Image (cartoon, rainbow, N blue to C red):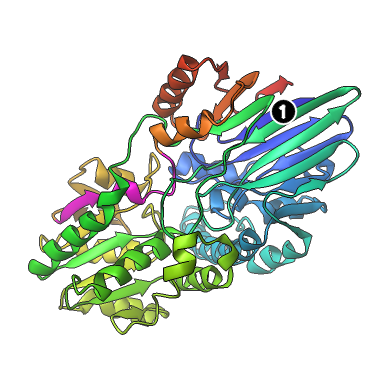
Amino acid sequence: MKLKFCGAAKEVTGSCYVLEVGDTKMLVDCWMYQGPKELVRLNYEPFLFDPKEIDFMLLTHAHIDHCGLIPKLHNGWFTGKIYTTSATKDLTEILLEDSANIQKKNTEDENRRRSREHLPLRKPLFTDLEAAACMPLFQVVEYGVLIKINDAISVRYQDAGHILGSASIEVRATEGEKQTKIVFSWDIGQRDVPIIKDPTLIAEADYLLMESTYGDKVHEDTGTKEDLLLKYVTETYQKWGKLMIPTFAVERTQELLYFIDKLVNSNQFPQEKIFLDSPLAIKATEIFKKHKECYDAEALKEFSHPLDDEYLQYSLSVEDSMKLNTYTDPCVIMAGNGMCTAGRITHHLRHGLSDKKNTLLFVGYQAEGTLGRYILEWEKKVRLMGLEIDVNCDIYKINSFSGHADSNQLMRWAKGFPTSPKTVFIVHGEPKAQSALENNLQTIGFATHIPSLGEVVEL
């Protein structure tokens, strides 16, 4: 039984792993790298495996660094089933379509440069038609149900509490007389967050692959994030400025709308407009409305759809988005993408970063090498759309809006195993975060290993 680490090994993004059990080869996630250009270029490199040899795939959730290269996999003649939850399937469909459109635009821009320099032109990783062609491969599974894939492998999806439909996956594998249970934690969410349920604890594993995104950090008290949001909204309103929030279309947007709705209903929110400048986030919110089976008890009781209130305005078209550049009243602008590497938020930053009246508020993880990370590290000038922009506006971050468990919550999840696994493979993290989680796990008696990209281990 072999496990190969094909992505997110000593990196945060790029989830992809091949498990070989006898004659069966299965894939867990099919990544897209995000971050600095050197990392993004790896998306164009050949896979570290032959797609034709993969019998089936398990998809943990719909974030693009977990599902983003499924069309490339399919183009490489992978024709097996892709097992995932119903919500993940629906979200993956719109995210892959959006990714294809972004790639088309980025490739056109890149090829204009290449043409001027007499370099070979580049093709996008995949088109919207190729993204759509993958969807018939999806096979929907339910949480908590043991699914027999073949005589050697059964799997069970458990709620990871990260985004709508996200899962930790238990894989039960039989090779000869040997039975082994491998658990892929994948992105573990915080407890007690709105809308979705808490992460499910898993009782046993022979081997565990565990994410470490916030392995070295503790979020602010989650009970204060509503207060912090109100503080930054109010301060920016009093400056008569724009509060710019780079948002991830899935989960962060819906959670923010949930809290904004509560503030409006309690008459604490200023008399200003909120612009949701992300067609993808609007589509994702419609999917949230559809999948109430993923809601926690509080959401089922109190949360219906905070999108129909008169204070909220959609910016569906590019023209709608551009009008915000000349909007002079105070407002909140929520726009994608969450790490400021592309999307409409980059246009708002171009026009708004230099204005002292404005505020830029981060509500999610900023990967190394992204524009968001540069700004957070207090760069006073950033290069954006070919221009050098002064950073004069106020910069804040609310870590407790993150969809990831922090160091304490990761340990709480790990302690759900009454008996320590034989080995915990620490993935999905920057070196500092991985080392911190490793030290914490070793203090409770867990044997650990931090794998390298391309490494193969025998289980």
Residue 214, visible in the rendered structure: no
Residue drawn at 33 percent across, 66 percent down: 334
For the magenta stretch, what is the residue range? 393-405
Q: Nearer the viewer, residue 193 or 343?
A: 193
Q: From the viewer's perspective, is residue 409 above or below residue 100?
A: above
Q: Left or right of 60: which side holds 141? A: right
Q: From the viewer's perspective, is residue 170 above or below residue 112?
A: above
| Mark 1 lies on residue | 3
Q: Left or right of 401: which side holds 124? A: right
View extreme (bottom): residue: 310
User: Residue 203 placed where, x, y %?
Assistant: 63, 32
Q: Secondary structure at mark 1?
A: strand
Task: Sort mark 1 into few (<14), some (14-19) or many (20+) by Cα contacts within 10 Å.
Answer: some
Q: Left or right of 166: which side holds 342? A: left
Q: Nearer the viewer, residue 329 or 291?
A: 291
Residue 285, visible in the rendered structure: yes
Q: Residue 419 falls in which quadrant of the image?
A: top right
Residue 194: in magenta span:
no
